Amino acid sequence: MTQSVGIVLVSHSAQLAAGLRDLLAQIGSDSVPVQVAGGTEDGRIGTSYDLILKAVSAADHGTGVVIVPDLGSSVLTARTVLEDHPRPDVLLVDAPFVEGALAAAITASTGADLSTVATAAQEARHVPKF
Amino acid sequence: MSLSSDSTAAICETSVVLPANLHARPAGKLAQAAARFNSTILIEHAGKSVNPAGILAVMGLGATAGTTVTIRAEGEDAGAAVETLAAVLHAAE
């Protein structure tokens, strides 16, 4: 089986990103490369260009990477990384953090391609929680 | 699509009384299982009908232990799809 699409969780908080990664692994996507870029390099709340760049590289197993940002400067910093390192197979998605990451991870675990995984994350916005 | 593949298309349906709530873990397993089939599959609960490939939509059904969920599939592997997804639901804990 080919390696699944990778996922990068970008958050202002290292714990938030790590907690979400734990949740994704529990729900059945331990075969999916999920990397986190949470907080600043010195452990504060914020976002880090270098952590995002490293996470994208680590999540990339040849079939593309979807970046799920929490909000605000996570989006802006990820955008800057992608502007400096433009690649057609790394996509920043506009999706709710928890639901989008979960839909992306489950979809990736089925061997779906990059655009299907990105779409699953984006469509998460339109699914009512209950 | 050729005539011969049309003639092998089937519609299958089964109902499962849930042994546990249809929460995140079983919904994830259901989505992963559904992706292995070509048939069009729907999961129905309390008048709502969703594609089981979408974990969020399945959780959104709000199906709880003891209630009934119906799996319906249409396509050449409909029988196997219904059987596999029913097994996933029966195994939910």
Image: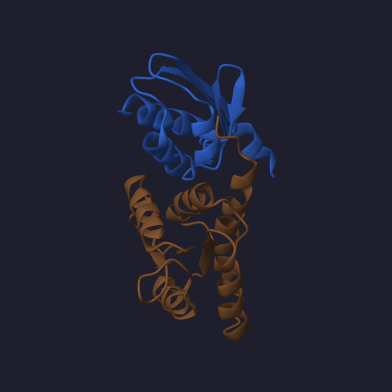
The structure residue drawn at horizontal position 30% and vertical position 28%, both measured from the top left corner, is: B93
The structure residue drawn at horizontal position 39% and vertical position 24%, both measured from the top left corner, is: B21
Give the quadrant of the C terminus of chain A: top right
The structure residue drawn at horizontal position 57% and vertical position 50%, both measured from the top left corner, is: A96
Visual colour scheme: by chain
The residue closer to the viewer here, A70 or B1, is A70
Q: Is residue A127 above or below residue A74?
A: above
Query: Which residue is situated farthest in the front direction here?
Result: A44
Residue A109 position, x and y percent, is 42, 54
Give the colour chain A carries in the figure. brown
Q: Is residue A66 above or below residue B23?
A: below
Tally of marks: 0
Give the quadrant of the N terminus of chain A: bottom left
Residue A12 position, x and y percent, is 47, 64
Q: Is residue A30 above or below residue B27?
A: below
Chain that is coloured blue in the picture: B
Residue B75 position, x and y percent, is 58, 35
The residue closer to the viewer here, A86 or B92, is A86
The residue closer to the viewer here, A42 or A104, is A42
Residue B6: image quadrant is top right
Residue B88 position, x and y percent, is 37, 31
Q: Is residue A109 above or below residue B65?
A: below
